[in-house]
Image: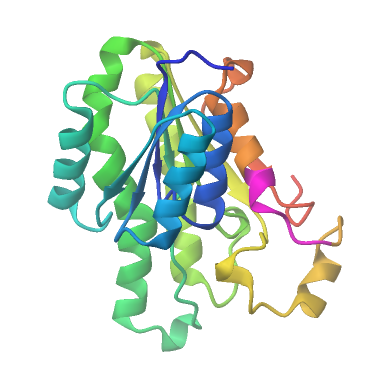
Amino acid sequence: MMNDHRTALIVGGCRGIGRAVSLRLAHDGFDIAATCRKRGDDAGSLAAEIAAAGRRCDILELDVRDRENSRAALLAHFGDDAPDAIVYNSGIARDNLFVFMEPQEWREVIDTNLNGFYNTVQPLIFNMLPKRRGAIVAVSSASGQTGQAGQVNYSASKAGLIGAVMALAREVGRKGIRVNAVAPGVIETEMTKDLPKEQILPLIPLHRFGRSEEVAAAVAFLCGDGSSYIHGQVLAVNGGLVIG
């Protein structure tokens, strides 16, 4: 178990991969602050499950696309303190061929997947620095590593996260704050439930979709003491879909 006073912020932490990350970090001893745009049954059940496991779980309502809304909600919760771990997991897809892509499809994906990282993580950095420890993990994607047809907006946003992680790692590493990314492949979530499995599985050497819990395990590793010398890296969780 981790130190009892450690806290983790999971942005987009109530559903899918984010929910699995919240549960895993709670199991590892973190008290959890999980964000969502609007509190619903999924947020309530997450808080109840974490509380039943003996950890604290606060649900924060915020829109990652809105800088002032995000900043106000986070600073109201953390005050002059900062979480020991931040996981940026908020993400959406609006797939379309680039030639047909509407401005709204581009903006919504970039605003959520990439600008949201700035809107939610940047306000907390200043108060992380004096602690001289901490971990930041961004959930990118295999699409951000290699690109994917029909996902120019999504691939651009996830590649941007990788660039942000590498640059931020150079800025804050001397203060003991580690910054890394995980890049999931095809994971069984609401976002992927309609994908044509028969076409995708032959591309994956392990011949199956991944599970949210497998991504959460990678995130937990990067937030924990066992990864104390891993910094500015991208950890792929993709069953071999992208190798190298």
- Residue 110 at x, y = what percent? 35, 62
Query: Is residue 233 or residue 99 the one in the foreground?
Result: 233
View extreme (bottom): residue: 100
Let me know if residue 86 appears in the view.
yes
Left or right: 73 as drawn, with respect to 96: left
| 183 vs 16: above or below | above
Q: Quadrant of residue 34?
A: top left
Q: State the residue at coordinates (76%, 75%).
A: 197
Let me know if residue 90 appears in the view.
no
Quadrant holding the C terminus: top right
Q: Quadrant of residue 177?
A: top left
Left or right: 66 as drawn, with respect to 202: left
Q: State the residue at coordinates (50%, 49%).
A: 18
Query: Is residue 216 or residue 143 the one in the foreground?
Result: 216
- Residue 30 at x, y = what percent? 47, 26
Left or right: 244 as drawn, with respect to 18: right
Q: Is residue 211 magenta?
A: yes
View extreme (front): residue: 52
Q: How many marks?
A: 0
Q: State the residue at coordinates (24%, 53%).
A: 62
- Which span is picked out in magenta? 208-215
| 170 vs 165: above or below | above
- Residue 97 at x, y = what percent? 51, 83
- Residue 50 at x, y = what percent? 49, 38
Q: How is the image coloured?
A: rainbow
Q: Is residue 83 magenta?
A: no
Q: State the residue at coordinates (19%, 43%).
A: 73
Query: Is residue 30 or residue 141 the one in the foreground?
Result: 30
Quadrant holding the N terminus: top right
Q: Quadrant of residue 129?
A: top left
